[in-house]
């Protein structure tokens, strides 16, 4: 049994590329929230700070930068996983051993 679809792509690699792209979008959204919202307005799962007052009313630019970098890394990884799918599908037709048959 093979996990290669009719188009020649591995379904496992396609799923990984989709998951990485979705994670990239989520990280970019989190970065925007960290850059825009003050710390006291963040959801609890994103590290809401209520005290001291100075920190609670400031944004979290380092968290935003880290989330943005993580999003970009996810997008680049998804691109390369998807690119390797396309390269793998075309390798058989360019193989000199299979071309002579």
Image (tube, rainbow, N blue to C red):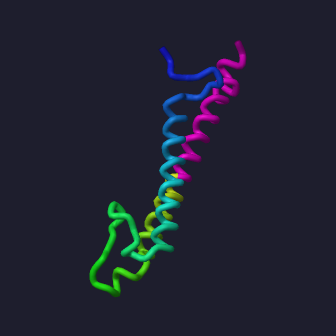
| Up/down of 60 relative to 72, above or below | below
Residue at point 62% right, 25% down?
8
Within the magenta stretch, is there residue 100?
Answer: yes
From this viewpoint, which residue is outermost toward the left? 51
Residue located farthest toward the bottom when viewing the structure as drawn = 54
Judge whether 26 appears above or below 52 on screen: above
Place of residue 42 in the rendered image (x, y in percent of width and height, measured from the top left): 39, 68
Q: Nearer the viewer, residue 37 or 19?
A: 37
For residue 47, which quarter of the picture? bottom left
State which quadrant residue 67 falls in: bottom left
Q: Image height check: is 28 above or below 53?
A: above
Q: Position of residue 40 (x, y in %)?
A: 36, 75
Most frequent secondary structure within the magenta stretch: helix
Rendering coords of residue 48 (x, y %): 33, 70
Residue 92 point in image, percent of width and height:
64, 24
Residue 91 counted in the magenta span? yes
Residue located at (45% from left, 70% from top): 34
Q: How many marks?
A: 0
In the image, 28 versus 36, the foreground residue is 36
Q: Camera-side residue: 101 or 12?
A: 12
Residue in the picture at 53% in, 28% down:
11
Q: Is residue 7 left or right of residue 76?
A: right
- Magenta span: 75-101
Image quarter of residue 83: top right
Image quadrant holding the C terminus, namely top right
Query: In this view of the protein, which residue sits in the foreground, 100 or 94?
Result: 94
- Identified at 54% across, 46% down, the residue is 78
The residue at the far right in this view is: 100
């Amino acid at each position: 049994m093979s996990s290669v679809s009719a188009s020649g792509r591995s379904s496992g690699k396609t799923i990984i590329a989709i998951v990485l792209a979705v994670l990239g979008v989520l990280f970019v959204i989190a970065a925007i929230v960290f850059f825009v919202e003050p710390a006291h307005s963040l959801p609890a799962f994103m590290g809401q700070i209520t005290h001291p007052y100075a920190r609670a009313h400031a944004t979290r630019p380092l968290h935003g930068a880290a989330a943005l970098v993580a999003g970009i890394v996810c997008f680049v990884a998804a691109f390369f996983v998807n690119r390797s799918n396309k390269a793998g599908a075309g390798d058989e037709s360019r193989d000199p051993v299979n071309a002579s048959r």
